[in-house]
Amino acid sequence: MKVALIILAVTAGLLLGIEVLLRVLLGFGNALIYIPDAECGYFLAPNQRVRRWGNRIEINEYSMRTGAIAPLPAPDTLRVLLLGDSVANGGWWTDRTDTISEIIARQLRLQISPLSTNAQLHSKVNYYCNFEVLNCSANSWGPRNQLAYANRFGLFGALVVVLLLNTDDLFASAPCSAVVGRDPAYPDRKPVMAIVQLLNRYLIPTVPREKLTTPVAPNEDKVGCNLEAIRQIKTAANLANIKFVLALTPKRHELGESGPHDWEVKARSRLAELVTTEKITYIDFLPIFNWATELTSLYRDSIHLSPQGNQLVSQTISRQIVAFFDHKS
């Protein structure tokens, strides 16, 4: 009996120690929560603050990975709306200060001298002395999710809309809420224990993702549907007199001599036709990344970018934003 009690006490102590370590050091037990949505598929639940692996994640009242904002910016604020997926969001592996949106905001502050008194340097962009880049993104969102978000919430008085995609997004399925609460990467409630979250996330077999997506209609043209969503986002920006930038990051395998797969080449070609027809300001990061000296340093996996990759993307986009406004008075 005593031996059993000792074993029970040791086991309980060990579990308690693991629970504390998982919560304090790794941030388990306080998962980001998702909410299903019929049009958008899912949102990050509003008003959340969590920490994972030491990285701080804040979700505001509009389900953005951004601090609290006013519905419309102040007159001296240059507000940018960044629509994206997990590349823009940064996920649990990126601290809030290292997301692409935050880096762009810092780059804009560096590139723009507020209210310059030098007539030769003065331009419209110098009017702005505050800069906001709103991060409207979620893991596995595609153009149709992003369009649904913009239709739901509007464009927040932004002067520039940046749609940041990766090549996979051209093949994204229609928005689907089935993943919420069924895929451990999209929980709909806080876990009872950090240990339970760890087991659910990494050790317990999950429902295959293809069973949690919207059934594809026969002969559905996914690329065509996503290109149409891109066109509609650009049209909404135009109607609101907002500048629009489309940026596309490649998958890691597309770099170098091997290049994109045949189906990716075809999708990129169709995207190029849309860009030409709609006169879209387009940043293709494939040639930009191929010019980089250390290709492998740009990625943390096959899709998501490293801090160096985030810096390169942010610097390129911020220069394009400045160019929109930097015409001499």
Image (tube, grey):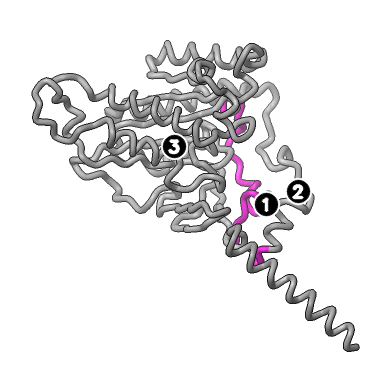
**Tag 2–tag 3 contact (CB < 8 Å):** no
Q: Which residues are magenta?
A: 169-194
Q: Which residue is mark 3?
A: 100
The answer to which of marks 1 and 3 sits earlier in the sequence is: 3
* Within-10-Å neighbours for mark 3: few <14, some 14–19, many 20+: many
Q: Which residue is mark 2?
A: 206
Does the magenta run of residues contain 181? yes
Residue 53 position, x and y percent, is: 57, 53
Amino acid carrying label 2: it is: Thr
- Nearer to the camera, 284 or 143: 284
> Looking at the rendering, in which quadrant would you find the C terminus?
top left
Amino acid carrying label 3: it is: Ile
Q: Which residue is mark 1?
A: 184
Does the magenta run of residues contain 168? no
Helix, strand or loop at mark 1 = loop
The answer to which of marks 2 and 1 sits earlier in the sequence is: 1
Amino acid carrying label 1: it is: Pro
Name, please, the residue furthest toward the front: 293
**Tag 2–tag 1 contact (CB < 8 Å):** yes
The answer to which of marks 2 and 3 sits earlier in the sequence is: 3
Distance of label 2 from label 3 (alpha carbons): 30 Å
Regarding residue 60, the answer to whether it shows in the image is yes
Residue 182 position, x and y percent, is: 69, 52
